[in-house]
Amino acid sequence: MKALLRALLLAIVASFAQPLFAAELRVVTSFSILADLVRQIGGDRVQVTSLVDFDGDAHAWQPRPSDARAVLDADLIVANGLGFDAWLERLAESSGARRPVIASTGARTLEHDDGHDHHGHDHGALDPHAWQDVGNARVYAANIAAALVASDPAGAPVYREHLTRFDAELAALDAEIRERLADVPEHARKVVTSHDAFNYFGAAYGVRFVAAAGVGSQSEVSAAAMARLIRQLRREKAPVVFLENVNDPRLIERIGAEAGARVGGTLYSDALSSPDGPAPTYAAMMRHNLETLLAGLQP
Ligand SMILES: [Zn+2]
């Protein structure tokens, strides 16, 4: 009887010492698009927290005390870099947390066009919105996979397998966007948005974007810049303007009304939609933007 009890006790102790499932890797990202890329590669092995939630504006983010706690508890922190989320790098440093991995390392970068007024945001000479080119998102995914392998070597085969599958999906998406936009006559591939978030999309897929505000989404638009844009739209007969999920729609609605342009729908620039919205993942976001552009650009 005593031996049986002892065996039972040992079995219970052993079951606690060797949990059935490995603890999930805690990953913190600055914004929702990165969070999805981490989930695609990490799968069930990761628990991802995005500090800026869906439809949120990461340009203007003021970290909360709970954000400091989240980065301190994280096994891995992922930032975009290129000045987009420098607040996360500062937050990690001031909290004594680990250094963020920069997802955009090695991506093809563009300098941002300084033709608009913008004030005092965390932007260097490079345009931070590199994820809007799917070719760059493939670089992000590879960097994230390497960071996950380094943080959790036991999961390496899983992360590599997920990266192979996801990279193939992104390559197909990249080709699809390029092919379908090529069907739109070149003179019609002209788009007006509220902030300068689509230069990478434009460069990769042959669409010309004009933004009312600068690269930072909170940039103020002066009356003179607004009048200039409206004159330009009338002159170019740009028929359609697009809203963005992270910006106040009133600016674009007003520009559209004054320039005699139609509002063509909402593009997702710097954040995903809620899970039940039209852009809950990176791939869904790019596909939604493609369909919205195609529908809006039809003559
Ligand atoms: Zn932006």
Image: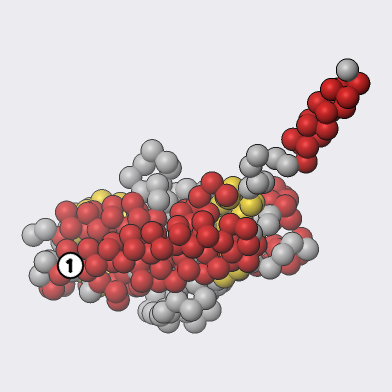
**Percent x, y of residue 124:** 53, 79
Answer with left or right where residue 219 lies relative to residue 293.
Answer: right
- What is the three-letter code of the residue carrying label 1? Glu
Q: Which residue is mark 1?
A: 179
Q: Is residue 153 visible?
A: yes
Left or right: 129, with 60 as reference point: left
Residue 20 sits in quarter = top right
Crowding near the residue tagged with mark 1, few <14, some 14–19, many ≥20 C-alpha atoms within 10 Å: few
**204 and 268: which one is in front?**
204
Look at 52% across and 69% down and name the residue there.
143
**In the image shown, does 45 or 72 lie closer to the viewer?**
45
Quadrant where the C terminus sits is: bottom left
Relative side of 188 to 145, left or right: left
* 156 over 102 or under it: above or below: above
Q: Residue at x 23, y 74 (%)?
A: 206
The image quadrant of residue 294 is bottom left
* Horizontal and vertical percent position of residue 3: 88, 24
Q: Residue 194: tell me if it is visible.
A: no
Query: What residue is drawn where x is 79% and y is 30%?
Result: 12
Q: Residue furthest right?
A: 2
Q: Residue at x 74, y 55 (%)?
A: 72
Q: Give the farthest residue toward the top.
A: 1
**How is the model colour-coded?**
secondary structure
> Residue 169: x and y, percent?
33, 60
| Mark 1 secondary-structure assignment | helix
Closer to us: 28 or 24 = 24
Quarter of the image with the N terminus in it: top right
Residue 74 sits in quarter: bottom right
Percent of width and height locating residue 263? 23, 53
Does the Cβ of the disc 1 residue fall within 8 Å of ligand 1? Answer: no
